[in-house]
């Protein structure tokens, strides 16, 4: 599936880049900019970044779930990350509503 139409990047390209980064250091923080750098691309309109974050979370979770040694700790971390992401979405929505009321 096409994720970034500006750079013609598919979800498969992104997953491969993430796995490559995780193979180098499985506990590093992976962000869209790091994925794009690994793909030798640059974010242009950056409208795809929320989808890239979703792919990063899912791929990282699957990568660590396949590793049997730290499974329980990783699942807890990934759940905390998922909750944090949801809290951030709610906070952004609330700020936008407040700004719309002020304007």
Image (cartoon, rainbow, N blue to C red):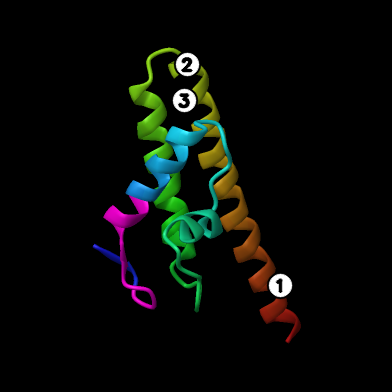
**Residue under the image location 39 percent in, 78 percent down:** 6
Residue 44's spot in the image, x, y percent?
Answer: 50, 77
Q: Any magenta on residue 101?
A: no
Residue interval drawn in magenta: 5-15
Q: Residues within 10 Å of mark 1 (few under 14, many from 20)?
A: few
Quick one: quadrant of the C terminus? Answer: bottom right
Gap between marks 2 and 1 measured at Cα: 42 Å
Q: Are marks 2 and 1 in contact (CB under 8 Å)?
A: no
The residue lying furthest to the left in this view is: 1
Which mark is drawn over residue 98? 1
Front one among 52 and 85: 52
Front one among 47 and 11: 11
**Residue under the image location 46 percent in, 42 percent down:** 21
Q: Residues within 10 Å of mark 3 (few under 14, many from 20)?
A: some
Which mark is drawn over residue 70? 2
**Residue under the image location 38 percent in, 14 percent down:** 68
Q: Which residue is mark 3?
A: 75
Q: Which mark lies nearer to you, 2 or 3? A: 2
Mark 1 residue element: helix
Mark 2 residue element: loop
């Amino acid at each position: 599936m096409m994720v970034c139409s500006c750079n013609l990047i598919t979800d498969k390209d992104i997953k491969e880049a993430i796995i490559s980064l995780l193979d180098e250091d499985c506990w590093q923080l992976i962000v869209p900019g790091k994925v794009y750098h690994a793909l030798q691309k640059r974010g242009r309109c950056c409208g795809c970044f929320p989808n890239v974050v979703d792919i990063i979370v899912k791929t990282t979770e699957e990568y660590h779930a396949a590793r049997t040694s730290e499974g329980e700790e990783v699942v807890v971390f990934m759940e905390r990350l998922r909750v944090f992401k949801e809290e951030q979405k709610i906070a952004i929505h609330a700020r936008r509503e407040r700004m719309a009321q002020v304007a």
